[in-house]
Amino acid sequence: MPGGHFSAPADARTRSAPAGRGVVVVLLAAGLARRFGGDKLSAELPDGRPVGAASLAAACAAWPDVICVVRPGTAMAQMAREAGVVAVECPEAVDGMGLSLAAGVRASAGAAGWVIALADMPFVSPATVRAVAAAVAGGAGIVAPVYAGERGHPVGFHSDLGQTLAGLRGDEGARTVVGANRHRLELLPVDDPGILRDIDQPSDLAAKGPD
């Protein structure tokens, strides 16, 4: 149902999924956070957890296969390893998000699809990540969650878009791929305001997370 609403069936983890590695959640955590004015992924949320650690926890609670794209030697790289998540180092990420996204996809080549999540969005519910991943595993081309009429993150992509994702450069991100494949976009309504909340400046740290 291209461009329409999508509800993943209960057996979506296995139905139509290619043999081999399943869907992979790729957490992008290699940005420079220039607008924040420092290492925002190490900044503490009201519950005391670093932003990056909270995003990692949500991804790992949602899905069994998670990788994290980081810059070498960062606190986020260490957080990923402590969480038992493969840290994909991408030093060239300083030149744009597209490069870190491409690095994550290349590092998980052969996956049935990808859920591209952002490490500066710690309020996304694990249930949302799981629903997007399950929809991709069920054969959807591109899946984006929607809350109160607004499209948010994370966004899922079928394996046949892997070559396109792996070829992204500079500031080309997932939005570029979605724009070129709007006929394959399926909207997934969720009861999760966290899909619209990112940490852009210090005042965002106090935003209420999911219950």
Image (tube, rainbow, N blue to C red):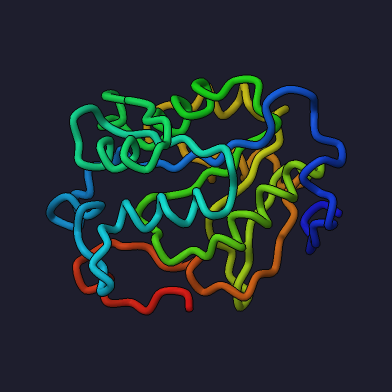
Task: Please name the residue shown 70% across and 31% down the image.
Answer: 112
* Whole-percent x, y for residue 186 in the image: 75, 54
* Whole-percent x, y for residue 3 in the image: 77, 56
Tell me the quadrant of the picture where the N terminus can be found. Answer: bottom right
Task: Please name the residue shown 38% across and 27% down the image.
Answer: 88
* Nearer to us in this view, 51 or 101: 51
* Whole-percent x, y for residue 102 in the image: 48, 27
Number of numbered discs visible in the structure rendering: 0
* Whole-percent x, y for residue 55 in the image: 40, 55
Left or right of 76 on screen, residue 184: right
Task: Please name the residue shown 81% across and 49% down the image.
Answer: 12
Task: Please name the residue shown 58% across and 70% down the image.
Answer: 150
Q: Does 40 sit above or below residue 75?
A: below
* Nearer to us in this view, 195 or 173: 195
Q: Does 4 sit above or below residue 19?
A: below
Q: Quadrant of residue 97?
A: top left
